[in-house]
Image: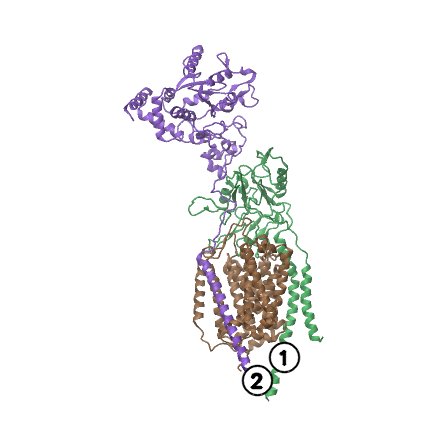
Chain colours: A green, B purple, C brown
Amino acid sequence: MDRRKFLKMASTGAVIATSSVSGTVQARGNLPISDQAVGMLFDATRCIGCRACVVECKDINGMPPESASPDAPWDNAQDLSADTLNIIKAHKDENSDDFSFIKRNCMHCVDAGCVSVCPVSAMIKDPVTGIVSHDPDACIGCRYCVAACPYNIPKYEYDEALGQIQKCQLCNQKGVERIDNNQLPGCAEVCPTGANIYGTREELLAEAKRRLALKPGDRYDYKLNSMDSSHYQEGTVAEYQPRVYGEFEGGGTQVLLLAGTSFETLGMPDLPEKSYASVSETVQHSIYGGFAAPAAVLGGLLFLARRNIKAEKNNAEQAKKDKEEKDS
Amino acid sequence: MTSTTDKRLDDLADRLGLNRRSFLKFCTGVAATLGLSSTAGIQMAHAVSQQRRPSVIWLSGQECTGCTESLLRSTHPTLETLILDMISLDYSEALCAAAGYQAEEAKHNAMEENKGKYVLVIEGSTPTKDGGIYCKIAGKTMLEHVREAAENAAAIIAIGSCASWGGVPSAGMNPTGAKPVHEILPGKNIINIPGCPPNPYNFLATVLQYVTFGTLPALDDKNRPKFAYGRIIHENCERRPHFDAGRFATEFGDEGHRKGYCLYKLGCKGPETYANCSTQEFGDVGGGAWPVGVGAPCFGCTEQGVGFTKALHEKSDVTTHTPPDIFPDVNAQSGEGATAMSAGILGAVIGTAVGAAAMTVKQLSQAEKDQADSAHSKDNSVGE
Amino acid sequence: MSEHQALSNKKLFTLPTLILAVISFIAVVILAKRFIYGLGAVTNLNDGYPWGIWVVYDVVVGTGLACGGYAMALVVYIANKGKYHPLVRPALLASLFGYTLGGISAFIDMGRYWNFYNMFLPSQMNLNSVMLEVGLCVTAYCIVLFIEFAPVFFERFKMHGLREKLDKVLFIFIAIGVLLPTMHQSSLGSLLIAMGYKVDILWQSSYLMPLFAILTALAMGFSIVIFEASMVTVGFKRHSETHLLKGLGKVIQTLLAVFLILRFGDLIMRDALSSAFSGTFKANMFLLESLLFIVPLVILSSSKQRNKGSRLFIAGFSMLFAGALYRFNAFLIGWTPNATDTVVYFPSSQELLVSIGIIAMEILAYILFVKMLPVLPKEEHA
């Protein structure tokens, strides 16, 4: 083996070695939950489909009405959209008269996908409250957040030339700031039956688990509006699905759900406990962590490129010389 | 219409102190309450003018007479006269001119004369404890009166919540063992007109239908006429938009209350009470003449288990019916699929690419073949 | 003397160029509409499908097709196979347009394009985001491509001084020009990881996404060189380059073998392979994609076939289709918009015409540049 070949092999070997070494960076687990994380608890067994929450949300956020079809003139959005940040959907059982309602809005995930993927930090998770908010002045409209949200929550205003991303911000966005002013999110405030209540995630999770432990048919005092409220309504305990949706899903959410019908039937995705964001970031940081691997690879490439170009130049000059010699 | 029927109508109208037009108008109005056409109204008018007025025996048990009073407040002047003339009210403790033995005798005679044909109306509940001694009329218990009168009645109507499901006397501990008519007379077909008091037209329309057609209106599972008790008050309440938009009065006299917001949070039982108060209202005086309309939450007087049972301030359960089809479905579809144009364009692009590639392959193959041939011929020529 | 020549003997504007110009113009008009009225007025993008063909074809597939320069730089300057030198400039030209127009397409697709500078502000950068890295890398690479292509301009306009200066430092840009595509082409695959269940099980390879993306991108890079060299040979009636292209064919074969082993291995390990035979549209598209990958592997595994220009072309073409379809499948066809799978998407006619127009612009620009600048290797006269 001559020196040339050896150096060649060594440099390419170095390139491969550095990339595999930095590949053993620690995998990132799910993000932790803030102690003071706030959220909401929606209990589908208490929901009567009055849609006061939908109306109030539109009012507070200044959203226009959205009709179901061009013929129907009234406000009856069929799904979340850039104009509808909160919606109540109905699931009707095909074979019986059974039905259930489900409230859809931003889940304010603990390890939010939208926050992880946004290139320009336009999706921000408040470190204290955990509320996921949006900054339209930073946003470039790439819509990666729309793609990366397992619940399909952020929506882009396609019908506007200067559209922006819209989603529920727990009524705490700039200009509204209800949480900051010790008020409740609109949907929790107007719910007449206590189906949707506000509180810290810890309190809400405890309340949800309390309800799961009750016996169906018993009477129970359901909190109205928020965990801090002194108002309640007595109701009959329904038969619940034996889990709190959002406790672990995708790393956990701050908006928790209870229901009598299966969550899958109600349109909620079945997510693994490990958030997708943590996998994406693990891969990205393993490869690019500290820029170590790219720098090492670049070093190798620079060496090889320079050497090869120089060698080629020398060969060309040599060939030219030879040709001149031959001609002469 | 024949001239005899015309004459009969005129006679009746005269007797009632009305002109024929007003009388017909009244009948069509009642028909409308029943959900029947104006033709039925005309039929009613004729039935009334033609038939011998059916006998009605009106028994009073544990009652406050509110139901009778309610009936007396049914609209226009001289209507009391009209009603009392449409039927032959042969016995009513509140309205009888006679009293004592005479009244009882009149009742007995009427029941004999109209055996199998009289309508029995019962107001108030019947006590059953201790042999029913807690309500006695003319020396006999109400229990006995009811059973006796029911034997030969053509139709039995229980007017008011007390007679329909027990009402006030049956509330709480029910010390007298007050029971509704249908529990006193099991197996008999009883029409319940609950309410405290019920809207008089609920009763009147039922009776008029019977008088005219000999039939009774369609009843629900609690034997209440569906035309009046088929829907919860919440469904037709004028304040429903406030409920749906989350606008509530939270205290009597607060801003929300004064603005006429929904009274749900003040304990309105509209969402679980079946009645037509929200549409029919009371007193025939125009809009808003019913409890909720004047700012008083409904307390569910028609509904057993609600009225006199649930606390006035207690929030009601909302009896929700299956959501309408316009409600957004969990599986609602959206999005634009392929159109002929877009599919065509895509097809054209792929086709062009593949076509260009095919042509290139052909030309390259040809070039290779030519090259192979020329090499071959070269070899041959070299070989020679 | 230069080893390259401009095809100046050919007429500059021909019927093909005219047609291409018209198609390009249509796209420009539609784009004006897009900017005046918004994305919804022109595209079928919706709440379930935020990324349509503008992102998936123009950016993801398009830059994959533009990996010719990357592939050739790797072969010639890193692996030191100098004999392939004549293929470098044409590949570089295709890459230049592919990436520039890919970057422009990304800009066009942005819903708030006037805020694009935020990607370059350290205060706004989110280092967790794969897309940030893709955006910065692609931008940097476009600049590098221009610099790498600058010698062609210097040669044409006889700016020898500048040429010499650039030659001294060219190796830096060549090295960067190999690093950057490695980074962002693999990251274009990593984009899919965060989308979780929305990417069908047949394509959501999670941790392996970047590896699959770079392997296919490289293979596409070599394939596009074969493709475009063959088209030039036939279109401009020049000598065949099969003697050079066959070497590239061997590289593609190796890349494909590694890729397919890993890909199918991954599918088997994740218990996903059985769903490929379920008969659904997605499953059938997977089968088609696999077929398109296997065809070139088969062709290129035989040295006899590899020596034939026509067979090389078929292999290259199939590989390009396979790489493109792999990306279409992963991002679009195998996409589940939400948990209830209730949204559909197909590009609108206007959307398609814009993508087609951008392709037309690339081809048109390529043809014009090749005629005006010394890009193609000099034809040896017998």
- In the displayed structure, B273 sits above or below A43; it is above
Residue A87 image position (x, y, % from top left): 51, 44
Image quarter where the N terminus of chain B lies is top left
Q: Where is residue B143 drawn, in percent x and y? A: 51, 17
Question: Judging from the image, what secondary structure is the residue with disc 2 in?
Answer: helix
Residue A83: percent from the left, percent from the top?
A: 49, 48
Residue sticking out furthest to the top: B101
Residue B32 higher or lower than C192, as above or below = above
Q: Residues within 10 Å of mark 1 (few under 14, many from 20)?
A: few
Picture quadrant where residue B310 is located: top right
Quadrant location of the C terminus of chain B?
bottom right
In the rendered image, residue B104, in percent from the top left (x then y), is placed at 44, 12
Q: Is residue A220 left or right of residue C45?
A: right
> Residue C34, can we see it?
no
Amino acid type, label 1? Asn
Q: Which residue is the site of mark 2?
A: B383
Q: Which residue is mark 1?
A: A314
